[in-house]
């Protein structure tokens, strides 16, 4: 069930950011890719999924990442949501689209 939720979030983020999912799960370091990944981590974590589950699902998509990087991404999104209403709006828009 959580894998389906992870995939729905990935689909919605891909659509909203106009980024191919292959790019999201690549090692690209462009700001838009990093931001999309961090939002994916944040949404999954608040669903709630454990960091290790997120790590596992990322691995299934070919993206190897350590747990501390996932937690860093979640903290980054939390900080941005607190300080930037536009960013918070984008994150909320994605979260509403997935049930």
Image (cartoon, rainbow, N blue to C red):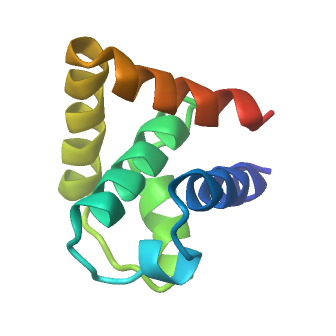
Where is 76 relative to 16, above or below?
above
Image location (x, y in percent) of residue 20: 56, 76
The answer to whether residue 25 is visible is no
Q: Quadrant of the C terminus?
A: top right
Image location (x, y in percent) of residue 88: 41, 22
Please state if 10 lies on the left or on the right of 8 as rendered.
left
Q: Work out whether residue 70 or residue 91 is closer to the camera in this orientation and state it.
A: 91
Image location (x, y in percent) of residue 52: 42, 55
Residue visible at 64% across and 50% down in the picture: 9
The answer to whether residue 73 is visible is yes
Where is 21 relative to 35, above or below?
below
Q: How many marks?
A: 0
Residue visible at 30% across and 38% down in the picture: 74
Q: Work out whether residue 95 or residue 32 is closer to the camera in this orientation and state it.
A: 32
Q: Quadrant of residue 32?
A: bottom left
Please state if 48 lies on the left or on the right of 38 as rendered.
right
Where is 40 relative to 58, above or below?
above
Image location (x, y in percent) of residue 17: 51, 56
Please state if 26 lies on the left or on the right of 50 as rendered.
left
Residue visible at 48% across and 22% down in the picture: 89
């Amino acid at each position: 069930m959580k894998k389906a939720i992870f995939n729905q979030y990935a689909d919605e983020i891909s659509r909203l950011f106009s980024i191919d999912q292959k790019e999201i799960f690549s090692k690209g370091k462009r700001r838009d890719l990093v931001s999309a990944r961090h939002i994916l981590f944040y949404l999954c974590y608040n669903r709630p999924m454990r960091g290790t589950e997120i790590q596992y699902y990322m691995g299934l998509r070919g993206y190897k990442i350590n747990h501390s990087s996932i937690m860093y991404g979640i903290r980054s999104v939390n900080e941005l949501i607190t300080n930037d209403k536009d960013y918070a709006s984008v994150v909320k828009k994605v979260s509403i689209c997935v049930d």
